Amino acid sequence: MPHFPTDTVTLLQSPQPPAATRRGMNDTTGRKNMQQLIELRWIAALGQFATILVVHFGFDIPLPLKPMLWLLGGLVLFNAISVLRLRTHPEVTNAELLVAVLVDVAMLTGQLYLSGGATNPFVFLYLLQVTLAAVLLEAWSTWTIVAITGACFAGLALFGRPLALPLDHDRGLWSPYIQGMLLCFALNAALLVVFISRISANLRARDARLADLRQRAAEEEHIVRMGLLASGAAHELGTPLATLSVILGDWAHLPSFTSEPDMLQEIEEMQAQVLRCKSIVSGILLSAGEARGDSPAETTMRTFLDNLVDEWKVTRSVSSVDYRNRFGDDLRIVSDSAIKQMVCNVLDNALEASPTWVGLEAVRDENMLRLTVTDRGPGFAPGILQRLGTPYQSTKGRPGGGLGLFLVVNVARTLGGSVDAGNRADGGAFVTVTLPLAAITLDEEEEGIDAD
């Protein structure tokens, strides 16, 4: 079966973001925060190893090296497992972050128990754990860490192994205890500045993505309302258009018109325009899910684009169209009204700005289809480019204007593509629509038809 959307309204009626986007929203922040914890744990492991060696051999303060190194090895092993877990399962929940922080608290408590208990100056590293929990975890998890670290501190005061340290606080910076406190403060301050800044950046990025999704949902809801209004208008227009068609058909056979070639030509032109209006109404109803016909026709990319341009030129008053089909090797696709209407919309906007010349270039860029429409008009105002795709942003001054690019952007985005616009250096403007070929072609095993 081909992987291709059936119609424009179906594409736009769901306010939910794509599944991949929703998964990204759920995973990205937690994954990045877990990466920060893993990096912090590597630093902690190196810092603990260096501190143990310096205190034991440099300050001649006896430490239980074997159990402390075993604990340090356990911390390194846990961190290695965390790295593998993150690579194979990118989703990270609040519970997993809580477990990771609890393991860090347990390892710190074990090292402090073996090296002085509450009298160890590095006991203030508990504050680092509490601060990280406040930033990373939900409120109940944070208070859980506060309670556990408080209990650990009390337990160290009751059961910790005191070190044989001289009471020489009066020596100031020359006191080993004061030096340990200074080092602990420096570590806390440096790690908090570095990692809290990174974690805050992750949270700000998450908030920005949430705001973007809310904006998309609001825009897509707006499109749904417009689609319902268009469907209702199409129903209302059906009867008067049919009446006009009958009347024009009768006029075309009246002697007073058949004897006047100019009048007969005008009637034929009016009949053609009425037929075009009826075709547009039928397309709206079809897109709204009503009056469906046969399955979409199978065609090729080159044929689809060539026919689209030919039909557009016939139904518009355009002096010159510079059409260049540089797609390359042809691909089989399904002829779909969504993309056809989208491209015609861009061409219509270009024609309004530049009635004498419009350009269209189709290029295949690896797995993407890139359609670029150019004109020789006045170009886009800077404000329009900054708010590209926002409804009712138009320089034409018509009530309700500014919906053309809004619809184009949303159709392209729903297909997984993008829209870019700008002003040309030699005058005029361009709009580039980029669509993934996977969204508009048949299955890979059916692809590869050579161009005629």
Image (tube, helix red, strand yellow):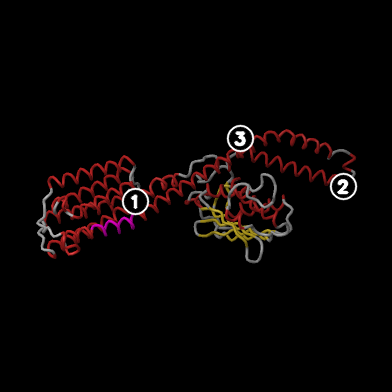
Identify the residue position indicated by label 1 in the image: 33
Q: Does any portion of residue 378 appear in the rendered image? A: yes
Within the image, what quadrant is residue 224 found in? top right
Using the rendered view, name the quadrant where residue 149 is placed: top left
Q: Which mark is residue 251?
A: none
Marks 2 & 3, CB-CB < 8 Å contact: no
Q: State the separation of the CA atoms marked 3 and 1.
A: 48 Å
In percent of width and height, residue 165 lies at 11, 58
Side of 436 relative to 72 (left or right): right
Numbered badge on residue 261? 2
State the residue position of label 3.
Answer: 290
Q: Nearer the viewer, residue 229 or 46?
A: 46
Where residue 435 appears, as percent x and y from the top left, is 53, 53
Q: Are marks 3 and 1 in contact (CB under 8 Å)?
A: no
Q: Main secondary structure of the magenta part?
A: helix
Q: Is residue 451 above or below residue 280?
A: below
Which three-letter amino acid code belongs to the residue tagged 2?
Pro
Q: Of helix, strand and loop, which one carries label 3?
A: loop
